[in-house]
Image (spheres, coloured by chain):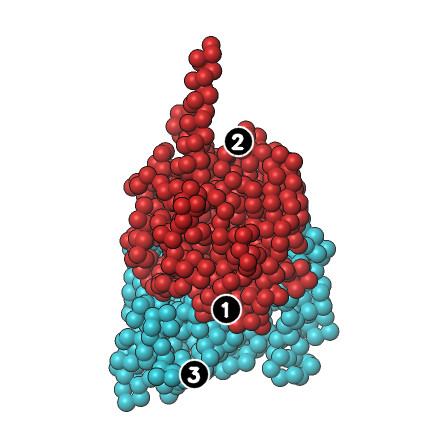
Chain colours: A red, B cyan
């Protein structure tokens, strides 16, 4: 009996170490990537230019976030990239030396060198021919590292500005490899249409390598994501053009296997880290639900709505989500009421909201440290979806999170309008510990994956 | 009415029949069902909605010789008048078409003419009420179709332009559309894009590329988008009684009779443009300007068959680009009697060009028919031609079926040809600072 308990304990410890050492990144990034397990030094904020503010163009803003630094909580670098490209998401290469950041409007992809001088990134390369090379995919959204590759999910196309789109696969040098179109009724590409929808729309991409699956979600096309949000809500035709699907892909062959109905624009995907946790979460922006995409006992991937987010009738608009490294918690930001909500997902089929706090009049992105103790927030959703002049404030805020007391404690705010920077969108972390300049001390803070 | 007409015009009808058999552009085999949305949302208001989406990568299209649509008369349309200073040619059409689909003709290389005038959406945009321009800038009006635009005496909903050759430049230079900074910058950029200089020299020998030939080229392509010989035309002008159903014929009676639609959407003895080249006040612009269309709550669709009522205060909180009033012809004449006057659109191919009215307020033909049935929106400048109609349910159905019979025979050919045209996207060789190929400043 005692031996059995001991065995379970050892297994548990191994699992804990495995899950943290091998998979837990800053909780939301590719598992094929080195991670920062200690204190991050910088936060890179992909920022949208605003007409009439400063130099009016998109920029990568670097904030010093190491409390031991003299310039802690200050902007230490600003790198303007020309144009308002609809700066949106960014993602690191598998070696974590380069940050890929896309423009949903201009379709340019800016590749920043963040390793030569993590405090002052430089522009390494600009991909200008994304649409031409991919055969018409537009709106490069997610940049997701696979070994030697970056998978880029599109949002739209160059034919009708609608939602039908595809994935674009690049190598880490920034060279185009292939387009993988989302399955439509006209060409399911071998996928099984599980329900009623095969819309061909795209948004996010995530993987669970040990199950050999890749998942994509679906949002809307250029004519909607670039449209004034208030105008769009009143446009009955436009509101028909949202994605209602998720696609399960074979990761190795890049072939779509199954299209699952997930009505109401499923956006961010976060897969569980635990070795036996064969599931991922998403939230639907319009219908305000948490969905679980899971592998059932027969090895089939299924989708199930498992919780409401706030009052769906009030359209709180869930946006960014973030899973904790231990798979027990899920942050869900709701844009309209500016609230960060924490769900207990210990039972993934029954998420329960245990905490909620207003971060600002609007909130979109959250990036948490791998230990979950620090959570950074930004408010901008899309340039034409942010609140009007009465409610539009732009900042980066740091909070400390106590997951026992369920308490967020505000640390500092950088006001992006006061600093004449723009709309603050996605954040990625940088640390000296990742690169050759690491010291003996910070060597402990970095773990490279088995590659 | 049609019977009397036939008896008095038998010789003409025979000639037309012979003629139409010669210019029968598309056999049934050639039609490839390109007309209609690739991303079909019919029935999206129901929980039973199922997608019927087409693959973009498979929509390769098929090139066509468009000049025949300009030079040969199509049944139902009058002879096309070509401007003397811009005779039609294949090379002009091909060059204009290439320009029409070239997204590099916008400041940030994202907007072409075709991004709003989407071929498979009736050369307009079915998916949004009012046009969205560069960087998502809101425009006040629904994108007008370009089908049969060659016959328009006036262009734009407010009739501010008179020739296609001149009209071409306005969207390219408009801040809210394609936002190119000037004529000169646009032409300089084109010169630096591989291939254009030669194409201009071939299309306009001795003239080459300049602001005049640029307008002439795109105008030539737009002028070729002629589409008639519809089922209605084959019945009414061609005398083929089997071309349309009895419902269509009954609907036509309403159209020219009780509905009084033809008083603006004109029909002549030998042809029908279905517009009068005039402007009218239907009350739609008035009602919008006066806030009559506002309500405290808006029904917002979340998913197929799923709706929620949203308080307008919430919607206003995310409405950065507050909508300005649209006063129609008054905007360009400042004549107070011109308030809310908008150009009569043609009804040809109407079932392909939803949503309707200058601001896209009506999503389908049923809503349009209901609007006119109730006599428009009353205002002191309302057109006297618009009155309550008191149409029965069956009369409305027949009227709609008549309108749906106006799709031109060659529409699939026009769309397939458009789909076969490469979209001009930024390449590594094009002028752009990020390509290290600048426009020549400070060199």
Question: Marks 3 and 1: same chain?
Answer: no
Counting from the top left corner in percent of width and height, residue A380 is at 57, 57
Q: Which residue is mark 2?
A: A348
Q: Secondary structure at mark 3?
A: helix
Sequence-wise, the earlier of marks 2 and 1 is 1
Q: Chain of mark 2?
A: A
Cβ atoms at labels 3 and 1 below 8 Å apart: no
Q: Which residue is mark 1?
A: A57
Q: Chain of mark 3?
A: B
Residue B408 position by quadrant = bottom left
Q: Nearer the viewer, residue B274 or A214?
A: A214
Note whether residue B2 is visible. Answer: no
Q: Which residue is mark 3?
A: B183
- The image quadrant where one finds the C terminus of chain A is top left
Q: Residue at x 65, y 83 (%)?
A: B334
Counting from the top left corner in percent of width and height, residue A102 is at 43, 59
Mark nearer the viewer, 3 or 2: 2
Question: Marks 3 and 2: same chain?
Answer: no
Q: Nearer the viewer, residue B67 or B397?
A: B67
Q: Chain of mark 1?
A: A
Mark 3 crowdedness (10 Å alpha carbons): few <14, some 14-19, many ≥20: some
| Left or right: B290, with B4 as reference point | right
Mark nearer the viewer, 3 or 1: 1
Q: CA distance from mark 3 to mark 2?
A: 59 Å
| Left or right: B430, with A368 as reference point | left
Counting from the top left corner in percent of width and height, residue A333 is at 59, 46
Mark nearer the viewer, 2 or 1: 1
Cβ atoms at labels 2 and 1 below 8 Å apart: no
| Left or right: B394, with B222 as reference point | right
Q: Residue at x 41, y 36 (%)?
A: A21
Q: Secondary structure at mark 1?
A: loop
């Amino acid at each position: 009996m005692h031996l059995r308990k001991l065995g379970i304990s050892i297994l548990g410890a191994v699992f804990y170490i495995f899950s943290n050492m091998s998979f837990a990144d800053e909780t939301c990034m590719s598992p094929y990537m080195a991670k920062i397990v200690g204190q991050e030094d910088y936060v890179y904020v992909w920022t949208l230019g605003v007409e009439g503010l400063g130099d009016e163009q998109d920029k990568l803003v670097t904030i010093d976030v190491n409390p031991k630094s003299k310039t802690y909580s200050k902007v230490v670098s600003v790198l303007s990239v020309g144009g308002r490209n609809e700066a949106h998401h960014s993602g690191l290469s598998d070696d974590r030396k380069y940050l890929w950041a896309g423009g949903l409007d201009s379709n340019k992809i800016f590749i920043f060198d963040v390793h030569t001088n993590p405090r002052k990134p430089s522009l390494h390369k600009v991909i200008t021919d994304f649409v031409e090379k991919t055969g018409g995919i537009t709106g490069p959204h997610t940049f997701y590292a696979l070994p030697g590759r970056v998978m880029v999910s599109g949002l739209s196309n160059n034919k009708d500005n609608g939602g039908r789109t595809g994935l674009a696969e690049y190598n880490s040098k920034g060279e185009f490899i292939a387009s993988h179109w989302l399955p439509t009724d006209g060409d399911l590409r071998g996928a099984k249409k599980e329900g009623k929808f095969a819309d061909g729309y795209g948004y996010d991409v995530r993987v669970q390598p040990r199950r050999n699956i890749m998942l994509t979600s679906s949002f809307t096309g250029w004519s909607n994501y670039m449209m004034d949000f208030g105008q769009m809500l009143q446009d009955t035709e436009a509101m028909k053009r949202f994605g209602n699907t998720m696609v399960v892909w074979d990761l190795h062959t890049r072939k779509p296997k199954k299209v699952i109905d997930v009505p109401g624009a499923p956006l961010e995907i976060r897969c569980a880290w635990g070795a036996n946790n064969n599931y991922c979460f998403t939230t639907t922006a319009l219908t305000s639900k948490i969905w679980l995409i899971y592998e059932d006992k027969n090895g089939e991937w299924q989708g199930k709505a498992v919780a409401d987010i706030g009052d769906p009738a009030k359209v709180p608009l869930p946006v960014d989500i973030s899973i904790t490294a231990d798979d027990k918690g899920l942050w869900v930001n709701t844009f309209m009421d500016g609230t960060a909500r924490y769900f207990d997902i210990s039972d993934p089929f029954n998420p329960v909201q245990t905490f909620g706090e207003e971060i600002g009049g609007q909130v979109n992105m959250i990036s948490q440290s791998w230990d979950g103790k620090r959570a950074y927030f930004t408010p901008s959703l899309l340039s034409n979806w942010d609140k009007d002049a009465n409610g539009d404030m732009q900042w980066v805020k740091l909070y400390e999170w106590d997951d026992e007391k369920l308490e967020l404690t505000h640390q500092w705010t950088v006001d992006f309008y006061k600093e004449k920077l723009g709309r603050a969108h996605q954040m990625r972390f940088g640390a000296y510990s990742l690169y050759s300049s690491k010291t003996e001390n910070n060597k402990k803070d970095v773990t490279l994956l088995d590659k | 009415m049609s019977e009397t007409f036939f008896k008095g015009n038998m010789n003409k009808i025979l000639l037309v029949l012979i003629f139409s058999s010669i210019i029968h552009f598309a056999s049934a085999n050639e039609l490839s069902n390109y007309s209609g949305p690739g991303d079909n949302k019919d029935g999206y208001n129901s929980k039973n909605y199922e997608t019927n989406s087409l693959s973009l990568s498979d929509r390769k299209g098929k090139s066509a010789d468009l000049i025949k649509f300009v030079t040969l008369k199509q049944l139902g349309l009058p002879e096309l008048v070509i401007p003397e200073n811009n005779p039609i040619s294949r090379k002009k059409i091909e060059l204009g078409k290439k320009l029409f689909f070239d997204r590099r003709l916008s400041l940030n290389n994202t907007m072409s003419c075709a991004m709003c005038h989407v071929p498979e959406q009736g050369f307009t945009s079915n998916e949004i009420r009012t046009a969205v321009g560069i960087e998502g800038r809101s425009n006040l009006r629904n994108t007008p179709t370009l089908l049969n635009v060659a016959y328009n005496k006036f262009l734009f909903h407010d009739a501010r332009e008179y020739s296609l050759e001149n009209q071409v430049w306005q969207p390219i230079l408009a801040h809210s559309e394609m936002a190119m900074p000037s004529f000169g910058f646009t032409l300089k950029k084109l010169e630096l894009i591989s291939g254009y200089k030669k194409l201009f020299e071939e299309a306009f020998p001795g003239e080459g590329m300049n602001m005049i030939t640029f307008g002439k080229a795109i105008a030539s392509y737009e002028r070729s988008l002629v589409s008639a010989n519809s089922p209605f035309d084959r019945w009414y002008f061609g005398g083929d009684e089997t071309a349309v159903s009895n419902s269509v014929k009954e609907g036509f009676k309403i159209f020219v009779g009780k509905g009084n639609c033809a008083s603006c959407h004109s029909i002549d003895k030998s042809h029908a443009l279905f517009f009068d080249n005039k402007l009218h006040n239907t009350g739609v612009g008035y009602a919008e300007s006066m806030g009559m269309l506002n309500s405290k709550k808006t029904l917002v669709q979340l998913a197929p068959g799923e709706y929620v009522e949203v308080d307008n205060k919430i919607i206003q909180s995310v409405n950065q680009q507050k909508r300005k009033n649209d006063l129609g012809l008054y905007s360009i004449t400042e004549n107070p009697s011109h308030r809310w006057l908008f150009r009569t659109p043609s009804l040809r191919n109407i079932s392909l060009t939803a949503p309707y009215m200058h601001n896209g307020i009506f999503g389908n033909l049923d809503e349009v028919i209901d609007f006119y049935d109730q006599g428009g929106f009353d205002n002191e400048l309302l057109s006297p031609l618009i009155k309550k109609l008191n149409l029965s349910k069956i009369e409305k159905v027949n009227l709609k079926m008549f309108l749906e019979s106006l799709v031109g025979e060659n529409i699939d050919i026009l769309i397939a040809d458009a789909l076969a045209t490469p979209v001009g996207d930024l390449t590594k060789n094009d002028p752009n600072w990020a390509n290290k190929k600048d426009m020549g400043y400070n060199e």
